[in-house]
Amino acid sequence: MGRSLLFVAIVAGAWYALESAGLSIDPRGVGTDLEGRRVVRDAGDIEAHFSLRGSVEGAYMLFGGDRTSQRNSLPHALIAGLPLRHARAIASQYPDFHMCKSPGAAQAQRLTESMNLVAADRATLNSLEAALELFEERLHGSGERTCIELSGVQLALDSVRVQQNGADLTGELGAAYEQSRFVLAKRVEIADCPTLLR
């Protein structure tokens, strides 16, 4: 009993010391650590460092997405989302714009944004996975669209290194990800598209 209390006290003290130093621990194991104005992503054999930029807040209609569960993948998921402000504008002219045969589909495709999402914690990752599963299910079923509300912070990729030997992969991987932005997702919620489009 005494040893258990001592262990709890030591762990609590270490946790407090790290938090006081401005470091944060991810106890739920998604490989994302927020360290002041920087984010460190442990992706298996590689480690990426990001700087925090401006906030990201909004609703998106999903037009694509994939959970990236492979080892050494920097984002947890990739999404292609149409910001709701654009979706509303297109829907006012083409209510069926989310269907491929609609004249509004090309307009929606041009305005769709690609994002590499880094989940801040396990709850956010679980919500993101649920949204992507629902998107796939609906895509192959009713054709109904899936919307999400997302809040987080835009990230700038500073460096990527191999953890074992420190080899710098920043140029190589930075080029691979340059077509879409990185976002630290702090909250992801599934939303009702018809309600948001009103």
Image (tube, helix red, strand yellow):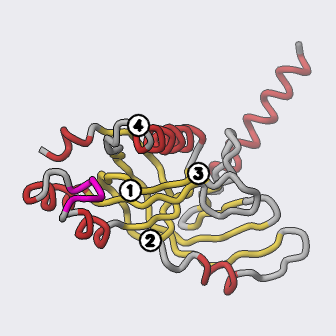
Does residue 100 belong to the magenta stretch? yes
Tag 4: residue type? Gly
Tell me the distance, in whole angstroms, between the alpha carbons under discs 2 and 4.
38 Å
Tag in front: 3 or 2: 3
Q: In the picture, residue 42 is in which quadrant?
A: bottom right
Residue at the image point whose x is 51% and y is 67% from the top: 182
On the image, the x and y values in percent for residue 196 come to: 20, 44
On the image, the x and y values in percent for residue 165 come to: 90, 75
The residue wearing badge 2 is 53
The residue wearing badge 3 is 67
**Which mark sits nearer the N-terminus, 3 or 2?**
2
Tag 2: residue type? Arg
Tag in front: 2 or 1: 1
Q: Nearer the viewer, residue 33 or 111?
A: 111
Q: Is residue 193 left or right of residue 118?
A: left
Q: Which quadrant of the figure contains the C terminus? A: top left
Tag 1: residue type? Phe
